Every structure is written in structure tokens, then in C-alpha cells.
Amino acid sequence: MTRQTRIVRGAFAALLAGATAAAAAAQADEVADFYKGNTISVIISTGVGGSNNVNARLLMEHMVRHIPGKPDYVAKNMPGGGHVRATNYLYNVAPQDGTYIGAVVRFFVLHQALGGTGVRYDARKFNYLGATGSSNVVGQAWKTSGVTSIRQVMERELIVGGTGVGSGTVMFPSMLNALAGTRFKIVSGYKSGHEIDLAMERGEVGGRLGNTFESLRAINPAWLTKDGPVSILVQIGLEKEPGFPDIPLALDLVRTGQDRKVMALFSGIVSVGSPIFTNQGVPRARAEALRKAFAATMKDPAYLAATKKARFDIQPKSAAKLHRIVTDILDAPPEVIARAKAALGRKGLVDCKTFTKAQYCRSGKRGKKKKS
């Protein structure tokens, strides 16, 4: 290579690098210009009383400072349908411009995988930002129910509350009934997990599944103490929660090979953690800016101090890893999906409104159109 050729190539490389840097700067300016003075809506699939709500609001309070243009944010709670309502809204109704973020409880992925009713989304296509953490799901019984172990629920009925068919509050007791021989009676249709907790306190239902250790630590830490008002019957996850070695793992309650694969599918959804995403169709530069803002927030000392104070255990998961987990669940072998569907098909749910006061239940009514 001649000296002249080297000079030309060096000049070209410098020009290319400069052009690339200029393009990146222009993209960054475009993102900042878009978000400056704008407002991000975070759609939360649970009611105001739960840990998912607290987690999402706390995240956004700090994350907006890391988004170019430093937008404002507003939180909107959209419970109902086992988290399907909020997911459908994000996929089909919300603008696909980067101004909407979802904080949806993980079960929307499993509900799609199992061909659940009402699904009008493809969870593979969301722009995932990451997950704030994961914690095992728990099955709990109010102590006045007289139930203190999962083995007792294999011998006697325990009434538990549920929200919608796509929620863990319905899926997990149904799955345990089919695969482990438990006798949960499920009342479906409560407005939120918080309403189920209140129903337990009223003595209306005897327990709840679908909550997590993290949620209990953040919202009801006394419930995890020896003298607390609930007994933790079972935990659902691929491994036992650190610090709780004596609470049986749902996987260990199932013996047959095929049923263990199905239980592993349900247990695997726990690894999705607390997913945060924006909808499909968002311009690439804005989606990437939101991912970077999420990653920066996970290392933000102010955010970590706030989560510690709120008793949240932050174990972040990257966007790429989260998307891979979601895809693996949705691409589970057909025979496992078929068996899982069969397990949930034996639910025999009790409708909330036939069981308790309608004020505690989802209305299920759509707004009527006004006459012109």
C-alpha cells in the first residue's frame, strides 16, 4: 500500500467516523426534541394498592431524568382481565410513538402462550426495556382459615380470590388443582389483588395465589413473619426463594414427567420478573433511548436508595434477556401447551358477583355510547 493510498483511506475513515458521530448526535437531538415538554403515560395493569403500582411509579419518577428531553410522566391504572385489558390497550390503542410505557404483570405472556381469551396482542413484538426484578410467587392462606400447609389443601377445600382468567390469581390455583391434586375453590372477578387481600381480611376468602415475596416485603412485610396473619403454603418458581428454604416448591409436588414439564412452564413465567416495555412500532431511536434510560436508572444511586426504602429487591434483567425469555415461553412445545391448557380447563370458577357484594367485583360493563 502506497503512502498516498494510506492517506486517502485514513481521510475516508475519519470522514466516515465524523459522519456517523454527526448522525448519532442528530438522532439524539431528535429524541430530546420529541420528549422535551412531552408526557409519558405509564399503563399499570393492577390497581393502586399493589406492589406493581408502587414499583412502576417509583421507576418512572427516576427514569424520566435519564430520558433525553426529560419528559414528565403520568401513571394510569388499568386493572382487569388478568392484565389482558392493559396489554391490549398498549398494543392496539395507545400511540406507537414512545409516549406509552407498560408496567404489566408477567402473566400476559403466559395467557397468550396458552391461547387465552381476549388476547389481541403478540408479546414478542413489544419493545422491552428490561425488568426490575423477579421473585417467587406465593400461595398464602389467612390463618383464620385453619389451613397452614399445602398438604391440607389436598384434603380440604380452600376458597381463594382471583381477578381475571389471565392472572396468576386464577392460573396458579387452577394449575395446582390439576397437577398437584389441591382443592382450591377459585372466586374470579375481584377488581384487583388488593381487593382480594381485603376479602381475606373480611374472612370472605381463605387465601390468595399469584402474589410474590417481593410484593409482600414491600406492601405487607408483617405477613412474612412467624406471627403474621397468613401462612405461606407454597412457592412457585424454578428454585426456592433465598431465605425461605422450608416452604415447598410447586415443582416438587408433581411427580410425572409430562406434568413436571407443564409445572416448569408455569414456574418459568416467574423469571419474566416485573417487565417494563413500550409498544411495537415505536421509532428505533426512541425505543433505544428508553432502553438506555432504563439501564441507567437501574444504576442510579437515588433510585436504588428509594427502592431500598420501599423494600423492593432490584435484580434488573436486560431487554435482550427478557425478550428471549418471553419468546421461549411463547414457543414452548405443542404437547406442553396442550397439557397446560387442559390443566387450566378444569377450573370450575365461581363468579365474584354471585359470591360477594358487586362493589368488590369488576363491573364487566362497557360505557354506553351517548345519543347524538
Image (spheres, grey):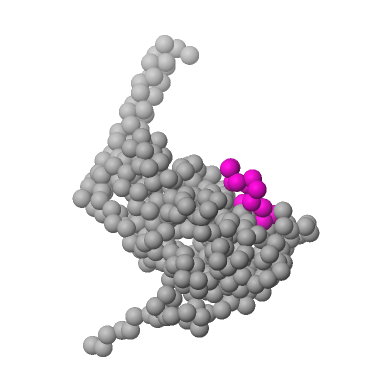
120 or 52: nearer the viewer:
52
239 or 44: nearer the viewer:
239
Residue 279: x and y, percent? 41, 57
Instruction: Say which quarter of the image contains residue 182.
Output: bottom right
Q: Which residues are magenta?
A: 236-251
Residue 4: x and y, percent? 39, 14
Query: Residue, x 54% and y 64% (percent of image)?
Result: 142
Query: Residue, x 61% and y 70% (percent of image)?
Result: 158
Q: In the figure, 335 relative to 187: above or below?
A: above
Query: Residue, x 42% and y 75% (percent of image)?
Result: 360
Quarter of the figure that contains the C terminus: bottom left
Residue at the outermost top position: 3
Q: Is residue 71 among the parts visible in the rendering?
A: yes
Q: In the figure, 161 relative to 300: above or below?
A: below
Residue 141: x and y, percent? 57, 63
Q: Main secondary structure of the magenta part?
A: loop
Asked whether 51 falls inside the magenta stretch, the response is no
Asked whether 237 falls inside the magenta stretch, the response is yes
Residue at the outermost left position: 37
129 or 144: nearer the viewer:
144
Q: Is residue 272 among the parts visible in the rendering?
A: no
152 or 315: nearer the viewer:
152
Residue 201: x and y, percent? 47, 67
Residue at the outermost bottom position: 371
| 196 with respect to 236 (left or right) | left
Instruction: Say which quarter of the image contains residue 345.
Output: bottom right
